[in-house]
Image: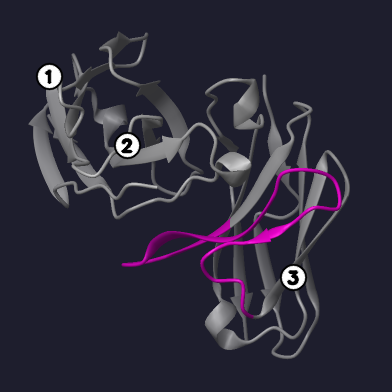
Amino acid sequence: DVKVTQSSRYLVKRTGEKVFLECVQDMDHENMFWYRQDPGLGLRLIYFSYDVKMKEKGDIPEGYSVSREKKERFSLILESASTNQTSMYLCASSLYPSTGDTEAFFGQGTRLTVV
Amino acid sequence: DAKTTQPPSMDCAEGRAANLPCNHSTISGNEYVYWYRQIHSQGPQYIIHGLKNNETNEMASLIITEDRKSSTLILPHATLRDTAVYYCIVRSLYNQGGKLIFGQGTELSVKP
């Protein structure tokens, strides 16, 4: 079975803390993505990466950074967590499309609450 | 990537076919139509995709109009477990990173 694994299902952090959300995929995919999902706003792309050490901003990168040191791992970093970053965070991976049209596989999500 | 328009919600009786429409009038020649669904509290799940021909797999069928400006996802015999939000996405094969941009989707409720 293909797998995208997010390190935590639920997380509670304090305002101002540095938060790391980890995502690991075992499919040797080039692409990895971080989304957040909020009621009424749907899924919004934060950052994506199409290769190791490569990253591109999505639609809402403010307040976030990412790290991709190894192909299988993509980390989302909240440098100083704020209450408006309380959300469901979803990680996804896919093959790079130049190898063919491909689907993305999603993790189960991390529900982050910042208090 | 082209934008899509979907109805916000639909109901379907269990055992009947669910037909979910999607408009993508600005789709360009190298853009595929993808469908995903998200069951409550889970990550989105891939269903099917197509370029211009109709496609069928074990989950669903995808009908794309000849001008490619709209498509319909068909769940032939909907079950209660098909209750979910369904997303129609158009995506270029060659856009950087192959990123998926989600719209609001259609919330499908399958009723007994």
Which badge, 1 or 2, comes first in the chain's sequence?
1
The reply to whether dot 1 and dot 2 touch (C-beta < 8 Å) is no
Name which residue type carries label 2: Ser
In the image as oriented, which residue stretches furthest toward the bottom? Answer: A16
Residue marked by disc 1: B17
Tell me the element at label 2: loop
**Mark in front: 1 vs 3:** 3
Tell whether B20 sits left or right of A115.
left
Residue marked by disc 2: B28
Name which residue type carries label 1: Ala
Tell whether B45 sits left or right of B77.
right
For image coordinates 25% across by 47% down, the residue present is: B4
- Magenta segment, which residues? A35-62
Distance from label 1 to label 3 (Cα)?
44 Å
At label 1, counting other C-alpha atoms closer than 10 Å, the crowd grade (few under 14, some 14-19, many 20 or more) is some
Tell me the element at label 1: loop
Name which residue type carries label 3: Ser
